[in-house]
Amino acid sequence: MILERKIFILGTAAILSFFVVIQINSFDNVNDSLQRDSKSNIFQEIKILKDKNGDLKSEVTDLESTVDQLNDQGKALNAIQDEITEYTKLSGKASVFGPGVTMNIDGKFSTPWMIDIVNEFFNSGAQAVSVNGIRIVNQTAGFDTLPKGQILLNGSVLTSPYTVNAIGESNTLASLIQSPGGIFGRLKKAFPETKVTIMTKDIIQMD
């Protein structure tokens, strides 16, 4: 009896040990699985964050590109507006005013010299030029000489004294016109009996 009881106890202990080992291995497998899942989730979250970060960078790049395009379009529109404004001035469709220079010519004169004066003013930076109140624009018919030597501008006969107005930076215009070899000196030499004067003005208006 005692021997049989010992054998039964040993057998029961062996069976219990077997189940304990199986249970421990099961817990270890579950723990490993949880750790693997946890690591997998972490890596998945990192990937998602990287993807989102990449999307945000792409959106920022697109926005910066859009801003640059808008700035370029704004510059283009400003340039176009400047061209329109300049064309409007040159076409005479709008009144212009500003500082400038007035040249008075009292005495004998000729058409080629008047053309030279107008060109000299424009070449010196004048934004607008008029002769005896007639503004020179891109639609102006131009100068001509009548049979008796009179100057014809845009269908109107010009008579002395002649007044040439030029709108622009007054000091610069006056300095260039009166510089050595400039139109002012050449006029006085070509027409010594003709009175030629130059005055700077704060405001000159042309319609």
Image (tube, helix red, strand yellow):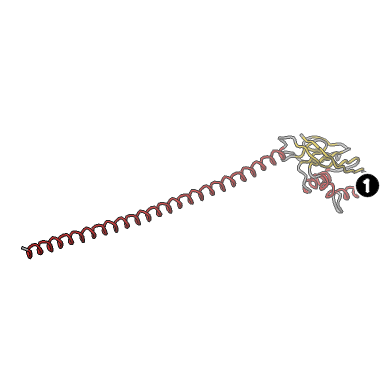
In the displayed orientation, state which residue is furthest to the bottom. Answer: 3
Front residue of 155/106: it is: 106
Three-letter amino acid code of the residue under disc 1: Pro
Left/right placement of residue 205 relative to residue 87 reads right
Q: How many discs mark residues in the rendered view?
A: 1
Residue at screen point 89% across, 38% down: 161
Residue 88 drawn at (x, y percent): 69, 38
Left/right placement of residue 46 relative to residue 161 reads left
Image quadrant where residue 83 sits: top right
Image quadrant where residue 31 sits: bottom left
In the displayed orientation, state which residue is furthest to the front. Answer: 2
Q: Is residue 42 above or below residue 132?
A: below
Residue at screen point 90% across, 43% down: 197
Residue at screen point 85% across, 39% down: 163
Residue 17 drawn at (x, y percent): 18, 61
Residue at screen point 32% across, 55% down: 37
Q: In this view, does 24 lie above or below 205?
A: below
* Label 1 secondary element: loop
How busy is the neighbourhood of tag 1: few (under 14 within 10 Å), some, or many (20 plus)? few
* Position of the N terminus by quadrant: bottom left
In the displayed orientation, state which residue is furthest to the left. Answer: 1
Residue 150 drawn at (x, y percent): 85, 39
Image quadrant where residue 193 sits: top right
What residue sits right under mark 1 in the picture? 192
Residue 46 drawn at (x, y percent): 41, 54
Front residue of 21/32: it is: 21
Front residue of 96/56: it is: 56
* Position of the C terminus by quadrant: top right
Left/right placement of residue 20 relative to residue 44 reads left
